[in-house]
Image (cartoon, rainbow, N blue to C red):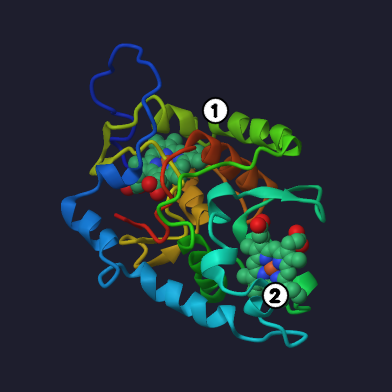
Amino acid sequence: MWFGAGLLAFGVAGAVEMPPSPRSGFEDMSRETQAMQRDDTTNPGMLWVSDGEALWTKKAGLGRSCADCHGDARTSMRGVAARYPAYAPEQDRPVDLEGRINLCRETRQNATPFPRESRELLALTAYVGFQSRGLPIAPDPDPRLEPFRARGEALFRQRQGQLNFSCAQCHDDNAGRRLGSAIIPQGHPTGYPLYRLEWQSLGSLQRRFRNCLIGVRAEPYASGSPESVDLELYLMSRAQGLPVETPAVRP
Ligand code: HEC
Ligand code: HEC
C-alpha cells in the first residue's frame, strides 16, 4: 500500500528538530480504533488473551502446565513483558518473550516448541503480555545486553532494501507525517502481540517488522532471528516509560 509510486513524498521537510518525546502509535489512531482497543468487550485481542489463559493451565509434555510452576500469572508474570527481551544464559544472548516461552516448553515441559506466529504462541504471549498492561516499559539493565542493543540500534539506522531507507528515516525523522493514507508513527513496540485491522488477526512485532521491510523492498528477517530480537531490544529502550498496551489494536 504505502510502497506505491508516491512513496517518499513525505510532505514539506521541517527544520532540524530535537528528538520528540516518545509517543505511542495509539495517539495517531482514529477515535473509533482507540475506543476498540480501550474496551475489552470490543478489543479482538482479548480473544487471544483468554485462549492464552486456558493454555496456561493445560498440561503438556512431561505433564506439567505453566501454572504448575508459575502459579497465578496475574502475580508471577506481572511486569515481565515490560522488561523483555531479556538475557537468556542458555543461549548467551537475549531472547524475546516468545523465545522465553518456547524455552520453557522445550526445557521445562519437554514439549515441542510452538511455531512462531502460531495461534498458541500468540495466545500465550498475549496472555503474559497482558499481565503488564499499563505498566511502564522498563528495559532489562543487564550489562550483557549492551552489545546486542547497540547492534539493534545500528540495524535501525542502516539503510536497506531497493528503496534504500532506514527505519530511523521514517520513525525518527518523519514521524507524524503522512505516507499515503498512513500516519508514520514513532514505531514503538508498546502493544505486541497486537490486533491489526489490516491483518484481521493478532500478530507479533516480527510480523510488523516484516511489513515495514517489505515496504522498502528489503529481505524480511526470519521470526525469532538474532536481528529481530536485537532490534526489539533497541526499540524497547527507545520506548522506555511508555505504558504496555498488550493487546493493542492498530489500523
Ligand atoms: C517445570 C517448571 C516450569 C514450567 C512447566 C514452565 N516454566 Fe516458565 N520458567 C521456569 C523457570 C525455573 C524459569 C526461570 C528460570 C529460567 O531462566 O529458566 C521460568 C521462566 C519463565 C519466564 C520468564 C520470567 C522472567 O521473569 O523473565 C516466562 C515468561 C515463562 N517462564 C513462561 C512460561 C510459560 C508460558 C510456560 C508454559 C508454556 C512455562 N513457563 C512453563 C519453570 C517453568
Ligand atoms: C518508508 C517508511 C518506513 C520505514 C522505512 C519503516 N517503517 Fe515502520 N512503519 C511505517 C508506517 C507508515 C507504519 C504505520 C503502519 C502502516 O500503516 O503501515 C509503521 C509501523 C511500524 C511499527 C508499529 C508501531 C505500533 O504502534 O505498533 C513498528 C514497530 C515499526 N514500524 C518498526 C519499523 C522498523 C523496525 C523498521 C526498520 C526495519 C521500519 N519500521 C521501517 C513506515 C516505515
Quick check: marks 1 and 2 in contact, CB under 8 Å? no
* Residue for badge 2: 69
Q: CA distance from mark 1 to mark 2?
A: 41 Å
**Residue furthest left as drawn:** 31
Q: Nearer the viewer, residue 161 or 98?
A: 98
Mark identifier at residue 44:
none
Please say whether residue 27 is visible from this viewpoint.
yes
Q: Is residue 64 left or right of residue 162?
A: right
Residue at 81% across / 48% down in the picture? 92
Please say whether residue 105 is visible from this viewpoint.
no
Q: Disc 2 marks which amino acid?
A: Cys
Q: In the image, residue 3 lies at what x, y percent?
A: 36, 42
Q: Disc 1 marks which amino acid?
A: Arg
Q: Quarter for ligand 2?
A: top left
Q: Nearer the viewer, residue 49 or 99?
A: 49
Q: Is residue 219 left or right of residue 111?
A: left
Residue at 43% across / 57% down in the picture? 133
> Tag 2 or tag 1, which sits nearer the N-term?
2
Label 2 secondary element: helix
Q: For ligand 1, tell me if the residue under mark 2 lies within 8 Å.
A: yes
**Residue furthest top as drawn:** 15
Residue at 50% across / 53% down in the picture? 205
Label 1 secondary element: helix
Q: Nearer the viewer, residue 40 or 165?
A: 40
Compared to residue 231, the image places residue 205 above or below, namely: below
Mark identifier at residue 157:
1
Q: Is residue 34 left or right of residue 50?
A: left
Q: For ligand 2, tell me if the residue under mark 1 lies within 8 Å.
A: no
Q: In the image, residue 106 lies at what x, y percent?
A: 76, 72
Characterize the local packing of mark 1: few (<14), some (14-19) or many (20 or more) Cα atoms within 10 angstroms: some
Q: How many marks?
A: 2
Considering the image in quadrants, where does the C terminus appear? bottom left
